[in-house]
Amino acid sequence: MNSGELIVIVGPTGAGKTDLSIRVAQHFAAPILSTDSRQIYRGLPIGTAQPSAEQLRAVEHHFIASHDVMQEFSCGAFETAALALLDELFRTHERVVAVGGSGLYVRALCEGMDDLPQVDTALRARLNDELVREGLDALVERLRQLDPAYYEVVDRQNPARVLRAVEVCMQSGRPFSEQRTGTRRQRPFNVVKIGVTLPREELYERIDRRVDAMIDAGLEEEARRMLPFRNLNALQTVGYRELFEYFDGAISREEAIERIKRNTRRYAKRQLTWFRRDPEIRWFSPFETEAVLAWIEQQDAGESA
């Protein structure tokens, strides 16, 4: 007997997941649990596209601006915290909506994390030193050589994930991708997965417009406030990294904005590559609310049969 139903809404950045999740949550009187690895941090509302104040008032949200940027929050920590939260939420709600584009967070929540080798502290210290000396691009190139398959799907702007994959490859002598077994852990709730996307040109146009809107809303000022924390994992994110380069005088403001748009489009492409490998996801346009609700109800009927 399932204790509840988790409606998981995924897709690339800028595709309209947040708006759809609000409509779905309101329809089912369900709270929302964010599976975005950056929206959990306080002080980053613009750059991480956190829900607006109006949206936060409309539906109960969790894991939005819930952690300090100084706090490391791994996928394993998210899995533990999110499952404990769901245990509480399902006591008073039949459904919970989980929404976000962080593929590892979604996997951790729905399936559990793989049992990977324990951290070799000496190796991690050496790789961290290399990251500081040579930069993220050098570490990404090493990952490409060690594990081309994971290189294609990982968020290459996220040093923590790149470093962990390189670390596992070097520590075990095997590609990281081969050790991600995909062995599912049993969950005490039903999962329905909804994918949200748009035709590529439309998606890219929306991304470009959203970046412009973020700049108008004060992203540059937000990034300046975060400048003292630029080396933290929370700030290794598209939008902040490019503006930090502008603040350093390495590129112009116009070039920073264009790089944010380009890197966001690339990130969206990698997200789609990741999520399209999951056959359990049923894909919709963000504007097909009624079709999404009908699909969820259909899955419920199937579970009851």
Image (cartoon, rainbow, N blue to C red):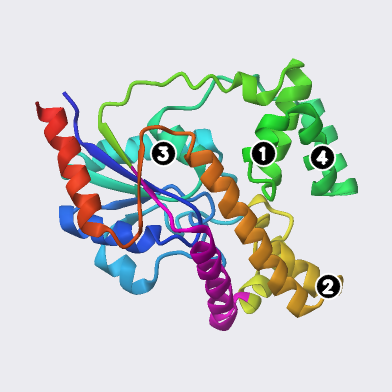
Q: Position of residue 89 (x, y in %)?
A: 24, 43
Q: Quadrant of the N terminus?
A: top left
For residue 141, the mark is: 4
Q: Residue at x 84, y 49 (%)?
A: 135
Q: Is residue 110 above or below residue 178?
A: below
Give the residues in magenta: 194-219
Q: Amino acid at mark 4?
A: Glu
Q: Is residue 142 left or right of residue 299?
A: right
Dot label at residue 152? 1
Cα–Cα gap, marks 2 and 1: 27 Å
- Say if mark 4 contacts mark 1, CB within 8 Å: no
Q: Is residue 185 visible?
A: yes
Find residue 251 and name its label: 2
Tell me which label, 4 or 2, sits earlier in the chain: 4
Q: At which x and y percent is residue 162?
A: 70, 39
Question: What predominant SS class does the magenta segment belong to?
Answer: helix
Mark 3 Cα shell of 10 Å, populated few (<14), some (14-19), many (≥20) = few
For the residues labelled 3 and 2, the Cα–Cα distance comes to: 40 Å
Look at label 1 and name its amino acid.
Glu
User: Which of the two marks, 3 or 1, is nearer to us in this view?
Assistant: 1
Q: Amino acid at mark 3?
A: Ala
Q: CA distance from mark 4 to mark 3?
A: 33 Å
- Spatial CA distance of label 3 from label 1 is 29 Å
**Left or right: where 216 falls relative to 85:** right
Tell me the element at label 2. loop
Contact between labelled residues 1 and 3, with CB atoms less than 8 Å apart: no
